[in-house]
Image (cartoon, grey):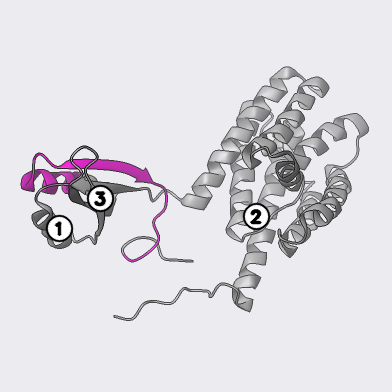
Amino acid sequence: MSRREPRLQIGSPSHTAFEYILLIVGSLIMAASFNSFLNPNQIATGGVSGISTILQEVTSVNPAYTQWALNIPILLLALWLLGKKFGIKAIVGSVIFPFCVLVTSHLGVPTHNPLLAAVYGGIGVGLGLGIVFKGRGSTGGLGLAAQMLHKYSGLSLGFSVAIFDGLVIISSALVFTPENALYGMIGLFVTTKTIDIVQLGFNYAKVAFIISDHTDAIRKAILYDLDRGLTELSGSGGFTGESRTVMMVVVKQNEVSRLKTLVQSVDPQAFVILSETNEVLGEGFKRHA
């Protein structure tokens, strides 16, 4: 049977155009969430958008103009220090996102409850940012600043991002109230979790590693009864030094019980390790993009 080709070939003009569409759509969703939930409730969840919320309170300047004013010098500095490795999409995103903030600035405000605003604003920003990441894009801002700090300080990228977001949230406590900062932390947490969901989806699977003296029988049960493929890895006992075969099989959540029953029916003494995996690409699971 011939292998199915991906729907869009990576690097093709149509794939590149699709990535830019994702960048624009994601930026619009982020901007709408920012203007509908976060900014009107004075919730700064980090990043340049959080800084723009704080500065609007201090200077009354439209957040879009603040974001452009901050994004452009950060972008130029990143071009100088990091080179062009982060791609043209970061340049486009640094301009597009503030523009989307500007054109959605007159959207209505569904709620003035800060908790609801933090949760739903976080979901919207995470959804938009996840879509941008799906298109291998970036909205620039403090993400680039974190990359520069990571490169020249030796700090991990995650910790570098946390430093900048933390400074923004602390600043919001000083300009607004400590309670606003706490809501900002909730919004940031919801955003990161939503990004994970967009990137990885809900299709969690399990990876099983099986060690048994009845390898052949378990292999046949998995291949023909469970109808799953498997990979056999070569291993050796840490105590005995004897060669052992380790079977690795990936199953969907609803197949876990069936797998355990099959293995137990063949060899009740089998050693089985089950661990969760967030995304599986390939035949029988999610198709490659």
Q: Nearer the viewer, mark 3 or mark 1?
A: 3
Image coordinates of residue 78 in percent, x first then y, are 80, 52
Q: Given the image, on which type of amino acid does mark 2 rest?
A: Gly
Residue 289, labelled with which disc? none
Side of 157 relative to 42 (left or right) = left
Alpha carbon separation for disc pair 3 and 1 = 16 Å
The dot on residue 219 is 1
Q: Is residue 254 left or right of residue 64?
A: left
Where is mark 2, residue-wise? 26
- The image quadrant that residue 132 belongs to is bottom right
Question: Is residue 42 visible in this depiction of the protein?
Answer: no
Residue where numbered disc 3 is placed = 235
CA neighbours of label 1 inside 10 A, class few (<14), some (14 to 19), many (20+) = many
Mark toward the viewer: 3 or 2: 3
Instruction: Assess disc 2: are there few (<14), some (14-19) or many (≥20) residues with their C-alpha within 10 Å of its C-alpha.
Output: many
Q: Nearer the viewer, residue 246 or 240?
A: 240
Q: Residue at x 88, y 49 (%)?
A: 73
Task: Return the disc, 2 or 1, that comes first in the chain's sequence.
Answer: 2
| Quadrant placement of the N terminus | bottom left
Residue 34 location (% of width, % of height): 71, 42
Residue name at image x 72 percent, y 62 percent:
87
Residue 186 image offset from top left, x and y in percent: 61, 29
Question: Secondary structure beneath disc 1?
Answer: helix
User: Does 239 sit left or right of 35 as displayed?
Assistant: left
Is 278 part of what is drawn in magenta? yes
Helix, strand or loop at label 3? It is strand
Q: Is residue 180 visible?
A: yes
Magenta highlight range: 257-283
- Place of residue 57 in the rendered image (x, y in percent of width and height, measured from the top left): 86, 30
